[in-house]
Amino acid sequence: MHKTFYQFLMTQRNDDGIDEISNFANNAFYDHTFPKQSKDYHYLTEYLELSASYLHNMDIFDDAWRLYQESEA
């Protein structure tokens, strides 16, 4: 069974927040409206652009998405 993007992102959490992706994951963990069941890039992009003030640069999401895709290959 394939993980959702959120499930993958939670594997990137790090309490020390040593990089941008772990900071993204830490913040997404506390975002109660994050679309946890989504595997759709465009849906997630729209959500993050409109609702995630904690993500200051969409390149961080793109990097995390690339890692997600590689993990699912």
Image (cartoon, helix red, strand yellow):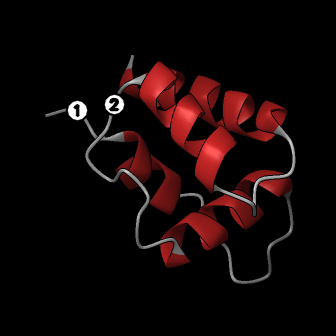
Expressed as whole percent of the image width and height from the top left, the position of residue 16 reads 79, 82
Quadrant where the N terminus lies? top left
Q: Residues within 10 Å of mark 1 (few under 14, many from 20)?
A: few
Left or right: residue 37 compared with residue 12: left
Residue in the picture at 51% in, 52% down = 9
**Amino acid carrying mark 1 in the image:** His
**Residue designated by label 2:** 39
Residue in the picture at 49% in, 20% down = 42
- Whole-Å distance between the Cαs marked 1 and 2? 9 Å
| Image quadrant in which you'd find residue 60 | top right
Expressed as whole percent of the image width and height from the top left, the position of residue 5 reads 41, 41
**Residue designated by label 1:** 2
Whether the residues at callouts 1 and 2 have beta carbons within 8 Å, the answer is: yes
The answer to whether residue 48 is visible is yes
| Image quadrant in which you'd find residue 54 | bottom right
Quadrant where the C terminus lies? top left
Q: Closest to the observer: 51 or 5?
A: 51
Secondary structure of residue under mark 2: loop
Say above or below: 9 vs 45. Answer: below
| Image quadrant in which you'd find residue 66 | top right
Q: Residue furthest bottom?
A: 15
User: Which label number is shown at residue 28?
Assistant: none
Secondary structure of residue under mark 1: loop
Residue in the picture at 34% in, 30% down = 39
Expressed as whole percent of the image width and height from the top left, the position of residue 15 reads 69, 83
Label located before the other in sequence (1 or 2): 1
Expressed as whole percent of the image width and height from the top left, the position of residue 35 reads 37, 50
Q: How many marks are shown on the rendered structure?
A: 2
Q: Residue furthest left?
A: 1
Residue in the picture at 38% in, 24% down = 40
Left or right: residue 32 compared with residue 2: right
Q: Closest to the observer: 17 or 30?
A: 30
